[in-house]
Amino acid sequence: MAVAAQIALRDRPSSGAKALALLSPWVDLEMKGASFDDDSLDFGNRVVLVRHAAAFAGTIPIDDPRVSPTRARLDCLPETFVSWGKCEI
């Protein structure tokens, strides 16, 4: 949500955050990767994650850049720190 919010703020004449700190960000709600089928990783399985993705997206398609930032233009976003673990999706 933090990345989606910053993208929305970037595209409006308002100011956003000066920086982002993303801890284990979920930025691909389409879940095309095979790792989403491996229930030994992370905290959820595909069934649970699909439900969460649909709740976040509402009526917006999952592949829309406003929902899946991996499809968005990321230029002009603030400095960003990303941290993740090796056993995450």
Image: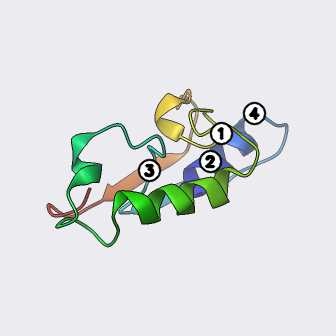
Q: Which residue is mark 4?
A: 11
Circle 4: element type: loop
In this view, which residue lies farthest toward the right? Answer: 13
The amino acid sitting under disc 1 is Arg
- Where in the figure is residue 81, as x and y percent of width and height? 38, 55
Q: Which mark is residue 80?
A: 3
Circle 1: element type: loop
Q: Earlier in the sequence, mark 3 or mark 1?
A: 1
In this view, which residue lies farthest toward the bottom? Answer: 43
Q: Which residue is mark 2?
A: 4
- Dividing the picture into quadrants, the one containing residue 67 is top right
> Mark 4 and mark 2 in contact (Cβ < 8 Å)?
no
Residue at 48% x, 46% y is: 29
For marks 4 and 1, give the one nearer the viewer. Answer: 1
Residue 17 visible in rendering: no
Between the residue at mark 2 and the residue at mark 1, the CA separation in whole angstroms equals 6 Å
The amino acid sitting under disc 2 is Ala
Residue 4 visible in rendering: yes
